[in-house]
Amino acid sequence: QTQLTTLLSNSSYRENAINNLLELVVNKNADGIDIDFELLPPSQRENLVLFMEELSQAFHNEMSDPIITMATPAIDWSNAWDYNALAQICDGLFIMGYNYFYSGSPNAGPISPLGGYYYDLEYTVNDYIDKVGNQLDKLILGLPYYGYDWPVEDNVINSETTGTGDAKTYQIAALMSEEYGNNWNSNSNAQWLNYEEPDWRQCWYDDSLSLSIKYQFAIDSQLSG
């Protein structure tokens, strides 16, 4: 947060960063750039818009048709993000629709729930649509090809965690489900499984079924992709 404040609040630093990024993209003959600033402080809401305006201008001056996108949070906890202004500047906002439950969560649960919780993909997408004034062609829904495997108290669904969860790739989670079986959670459209080794562990992940339902949700919401 301190580093972002330092960068975004200083016009010289913004210019240096943009020039360095542009040089990298041009030298690699890439098509454009995706900016991912994590934990944006609310004080930098307007400066981020300024940064993206300056970046867009610089890239369009040097490249014929650069693609400019941003990775944006599932939930804007502190109203730090001006989604509307950023959507107008960018070709797309990539909504990071995951980590609703994360490695440090107090309970095991779905990484990318669609239903079952107040804060879920539906909340996120509706929040974006509302704040960008229906610029649906600028919204892209990101979904997780991974899950988390937590040490837990017992074999009950959403058991309390006893430590930090380990990330498991799509492929590893699929192999785990073959070994331990799995449970479909229809409330949140996610898969989960339990096993002992020797203490209880619980893994939540997305597979082809859960992802297909979330793809359909993006299509039904008329998002860009």
Image (cartoon, rainbow, N blue to C red):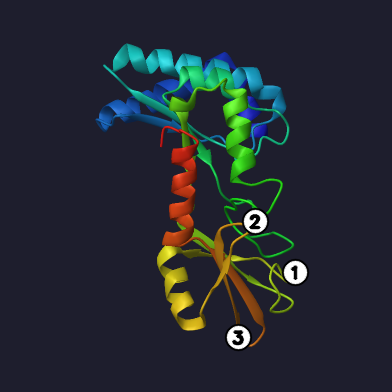
Task: Mark 2 or mark 3: name the one nearer the start of the chain.
Answer: 2
Q: CA distance from mark 3 to mark 1?
A: 17 Å
Q: Residue at x 58, y 70 (%)?
A: 203
Q: Nearest the camera: 225 or 101?
A: 225
Dot 2 amino acid type: Phe
Q: CA distance from mark 2 to mark 3?
A: 22 Å
Label at residue 197: 3
Q: Residue at x 57, y 28 (%)?
A: 129
Residue topped by disc 1? 160
Q: Nearer the viewer, mark 2 or mark 3?
A: 2
Label at residue 101: 2
Q: Nearest the camera: 171 or 214?
A: 214
The x and y percentages for residue 192 are 57, 69
Q: In what element is the residue under mark 2? A: loop
Vertical relation: 130 (above or below) 105: above
Q: In what element is the residue under mark 1? A: loop
Q: CB of mark 2 within 8 Å of CB of mark 3?
A: no
Vertical relation: 188 (above or below) 172: above
Task: Mark 3 or mark 1: name the one nearer the start of the chain.
Answer: 1
Q: In what element is the residue under mark 3? A: loop
The x and y percentages for residue 73 are 59, 38
